[in-house]
Amino acid sequence: MDRGAVSAPRPAQLKTARAELSALDPALAAADAAVPEFEWRIRPAGFAGLVKMVVEQQVSVAAAAAIWGRFEAGLVVVTPQTVLAMDEAGLRSFGLSGQKVRYARAIADAGFDFDNLPNLSDEDAVAALTAIKGVGRWTAETYLMFCEGRLDVFPAGDVALQEAVRMAEAAPARLNEKSLYARAEAWRPFRGVAAHLLWAYYGMVRRGEVSLPAGSI
């Protein structure tokens, strides 16, 4: 069964977390100084929420919205049953690649218990999600942040997060996934807040709304 959107962390929670993170890491302090108050991103949880995240990967925002719109309209209700009832050609007609069709069907066929997911620790929840074919660690971690509202999940494999840290401290090269995971350990229990803060900072830099420290490229 799909569940509705969970409650987002309160502004006071985010303010407290940002203050603690800023005291822990100069890169986060630089990002915090530039980024105004933001809201936590929350998306609907459950089967449709996870499939939507897979559908949206590696395409533009506009293309993802168009594909998902056709997907929803074509299935009427996005459930494991409606996905499995449609053949590959029908699913591809919505704009999905062959690989994404296979992943959507694998998620549908997994019989995953989304209602039990909140009862699992972050680590166990990531392990459970990544056991599904087509769901990688990045997808699992971002699902838990956006759809479960978890505060301490950090997708260190995200290139934008790696680049945001590099820009914030004017480093010559960005950290790889393993190194960023290790660095983020110090940010517990607010690694998800750090991710939101760094994404916001990255977006502001890309839009020219904030100047980089001297030496950044």
Image (cartoon, rainbow, N blue to C red):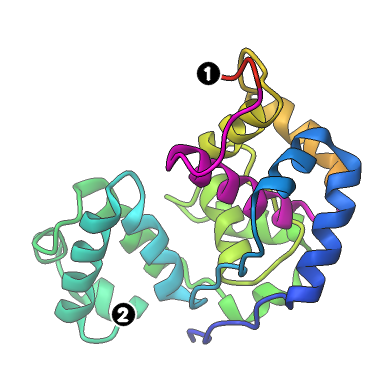
- x%, y% of residue 32? 73, 49
User: How many discs mark residues in the rendered view?
Assistant: 2
Q: Main secondary structure of the magenta part?
A: helix
Q: Amino acid at mark 2?
A: Val
Q: Is residue 167 above or below residue 41?
A: above
Q: Amino acid at mark 1?
A: Ile
Could you say which quadrant of the image residue 125 lies in?
bottom right
Is 194 left or right of 107, judged from the image as shown? Answer: right
Report whether residue 189 is seen.
no
Disc 1 on helix, strand or loop? Answer: loop
The alpha-carbon separation of the residues under discs 2 and 1 comes to 43 Å
Looking at the image, is mark 2 or mark 1 nearer the viewer? 1
- x%, y% of residue 127? 66, 53
Q: For residue 107: magenta?
A: no
Residue located at (63% from left, 45% from top): 198
Residue located at (59% from left, 45% from top): 201
Task: Please state which of residues 75 and 31 is positioned toward the viewer in this rendering.
Answer: 31
Disc 2 on helix, strand or loop? Answer: loop
Could you say which quadrant of the image residue 116 lies in?
bottom right
Is 22 left or right of 77, judged from the image as shown? Answer: right
What are the residue bounds of the magenta stretch? 188-213
Give neighbour class at mark 1: few <14, some 14-19, many 20+ (Cα, 10 Å): few
Give neighbour class at mark 2: few <14, some 14-19, many 20+ (Cα, 10 Å): some
Name the N-terminal-most of marks 2 and 1.
Answer: 2
Residue located at (74% from left, 39% from top): 30
Q: Is residue 52 above or below residue 142?
A: below
Q: Which residue, given by chain and number where applicable, does mark 1 sit on?
A: 217
Disc 2 vs disc 1: Cβ atoms closer than 8 Å? no
Q: Which residue, given by chain and number where applicable, does mark 2 sit on?
A: 78
